[in-house]
Image (tube, grey):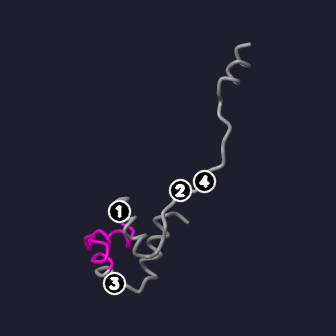
Amino acid sequence: MSLTEQLRKAIHNSGLSLYAIGKATCTPYAAIHGFANEYRDIKLETADKLADLFGMKLTMPKRPKTQTIGKKARKKKGG
């Protein structure tokens, strides 16, 4: 589930009005309403405020290391 999907789900499941969420996060109602109804994106700062309000933590998942072409591969290619 994407970050935006998680935040939208939290908004809808919170039991709070969009007005109350806007007030609690110091975010205009129009921004919250547009985001919740999937026709507007939000700023990262707003996502952070929403996550704080709903007790969520925004983190980057650890990605597995991928093999990259480095100097060793070039040496093999050149001879």
- Disc 1: CA contacts within 10 A as few (<14), some (14-19) or many (>=20): some
Residue 62: give its label.
Answer: 4
Tell me if label 4 and label 2 are in contact, CB under 8 Å: yes
Residue at the disc numbered 3:
17
What amino acid is found at the position of numbered circle 3 in the picture? Answer: Ser
Majority secondary structure of magenta residues:
helix
Work out which residue is located at the far bottom of the displayed protein and give it.
15
- Magenta-highlighted residues: 21-40
- The quadrant of the image that shows the N terminus is bottom right
- Disc 3: CA contacts within 10 A as few (<14), some (14-19) or many (>=20): few
Mark 2 vs mark 1, CA separation in Å: 18 Å
What amino acid is found at the position of numbered circle 2 in the picture? Answer: Met
Mark 4 vs mark 1, CA separation in Å: 24 Å
Residue at the disc numbered 2:
60
What amino acid is found at the position of numbered circle 4 in the picture? Answer: Lys
Q: Residue 42, percent across and down?
A: 35, 62
